[in-house]
Image (cartoon, helix red, strand yellow):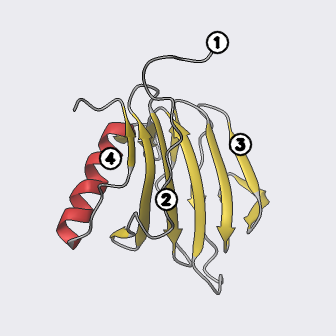
Amino acid sequence: MVPMHGLTEAMHIGADEVPWVYAGELGIKVLHVDLNQGLWVLINRFPPGYQVQTHYHTGVVFAYTLSGSWGYAEYPQYENRAGSYLYEPAHSVHTLTVPADNDEITEVWFAIYGANVNIDADGQVVGITDAQSILGAYRTLCDAAGEDHSKVIVVGEPA
């Protein structure tokens, strides 16, 4: 059956309608957040030599590499390069690393369900990011940079 009420129309964002902002060296472009499903879709830019805090996700993650290369410290046999697709099951512990000898910025598109749980070397939780918090952080970074974040597709936010 086709839904007769609610969101039934496709939504589009032009290539330049959602800005890049930076948290330190990490580039972030949030495209879509569905607060009902705990989904966040974004593109990240990682400079050569960048390493993300060891973490796991409470839901599945889909990733497509647009440029550069990266991998997980825990799985050195896999290298994601432009055109590579990655599926992560929930609770896979990993440390995203970008080779220091990359000669370009690494850009990766991610669709993430649930929370990103950062852990320390002892497995203790040191931070959590989810759909709501990434949306808030992105809006704050955009506001601080004087950028417009109004084109981000947001589902499930009270009007």
Three-letter amino acid code at the position of disc 1: Met
Q: Which mark is residue 1?
A: 1
85 w.r.t. 79: above or below: above
Is tag 2's residue or tag 4's residue first in the polypeptide sequence?
A: 2
Q: What amino acid does circle 3 point to?
A: Tyr
- Chain-order first, disc 4 or disc 1: 1
Looking at the image, can residue 56 be seen?
yes
Instruction: Please rate how many residues cluster around mark 2, counting C-alpha atoms within 10 Å: few if below 14, some from 14 to 19, many from 20.
Output: some
Of the image marks 2 and 1, the number of the one nearer the N terminus:
1
Q: Label 4: how many residues lie within 10 Å, few (<14), some (14-19) or many (20+)? A: many
Identify which amino acid the numbered label 4 is placed on: Leu
* Image mark for residue 52: 2
Asked whether 17 or 131 is in front, the reply is 17
Disc ID at residue 135:
4
CA separation in Å, label 2 and label 3: 18 Å
Q: Residue at 46% across / 53% down in the picture? A: 31
- From mark 2 to mark 4, how far is it between C-alphas? 19 Å
Q: Amino acid at mark 2?
A: Val
Q: Name the residue rendered at 58%, 68% in the picture.
A: 107
78 lies above or below 47: above
Q: Nearer the viewer, mark 4 or mark 3?
A: 4
